[in-house]
Amino acid sequence: MPTNPPQYGKRAESEELPLAGRVVIVTGGGRGLGRAMTLGLVQAGAAVLATAGREQGEVERVAAEAATAGAPDRVLPILADVTREEDCRRIVATALDRFGRLDLLVNNAGRGMKYVSEKFMTEPTRFWETAPDAWRLVIDTNVVGPFLMARAAVPPMLDAGWGRIVNISMNAETMRRRGFSPYGPSKAALESATIIWAQDLAGSGVTVNTLLPGGATLTGMIPASFPDRLRATLLDPAIMVPPLLWLASAKSDGVTGRRFVAVNWREDSPEAAAAGW
């Protein structure tokens, strides 16, 4: 558990904004990890296009929260489905039209095991019992969506000679957990894509890395039936913010194809959070 998660209070005008001028897309930015990362990015000075696949009200509330915390007009809420190529192109086009640039894509939008079964934490569903439509929904969102978003985002980053793609993942142990199909395979595929994309973009100034919390985290993927006594043990989604801010900055130039575990993050030693897969 993080001992001092970031606080989203008002920032003094004189305080340095390390990401001032940066433009970021956070998919699934309305709740859980996405909300925490969106608020952390805007507090660091970035402008964020936060997407929601079904409920624009989610990202509108995050925009209002950012404004209340002293960062007005720095969250642009967008209703878009990352499984639709035209929506992905529209998100990137909006960033370029509105801000003239795109610096960072955070592929966070995802669907978890509750789309297979609300009881997935206590009663694992065997893979042959999984409905094909549920399988496709998870794979389309968690694998196809990041591909479509990255495909749309990379050309303007290449033109600029600088950019960041951060793919949000989960523990390798969870990928292999009984009953966690197709969620586990979807994240394994995304981590493989991270390594391949990083090689494809080598030397371009555009980097691709994976970031994960490092343990079960209090997000919308946790079912309502999850016991209250265990909820207190879950990680705070804000744990993602410090390593993400580093990855979004020039301090991480040249760092690509890596996997960072947020729970191990140390500001004075970023490599402490780097892990194998």
Image (cartoon, helix red, strand yellow):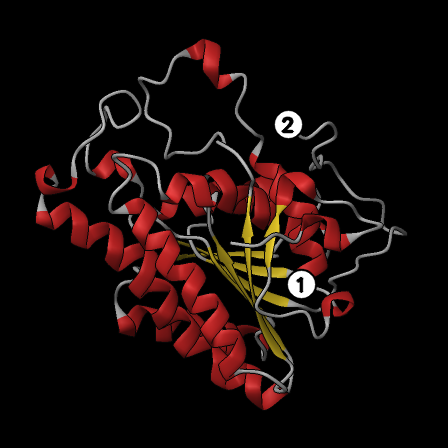
Residue 248 quadrant: bottom right
Query: In the picture provided, is 241 more to the left or to the right than 25?
Result: right
In this rendering, position of residue 59 left or right of residue 189: right
Residue identifier under label 1: 248
Closer-to-camera residue (228/79): 228
User: Is residue 93 among the parts visible in the rendering?
Assistant: no
- Which residue type does callout 1 highlight? Ala
Mark nearer the N terminus (2 vs 1): 2
Answer with left or right where residue 131 lies relative to residue 181: left
- Using residue 66 as the reference point, say whether residue 32 is left or right of it: left
Report the residue marked by disc 2: 1
Residue lying farthest top?
229
> x, y (%) of residue 88?
35, 70
Q: Quadrant of residue 224?
A: top left
Residue at the far right in the pictured view: 14
Depth check, front residue: 184 or 224: 184
Q: Residue at x 36, y 18 (%)?
A: 226
> In the image, what residue occupies the spot 23% across and 28% down?
124
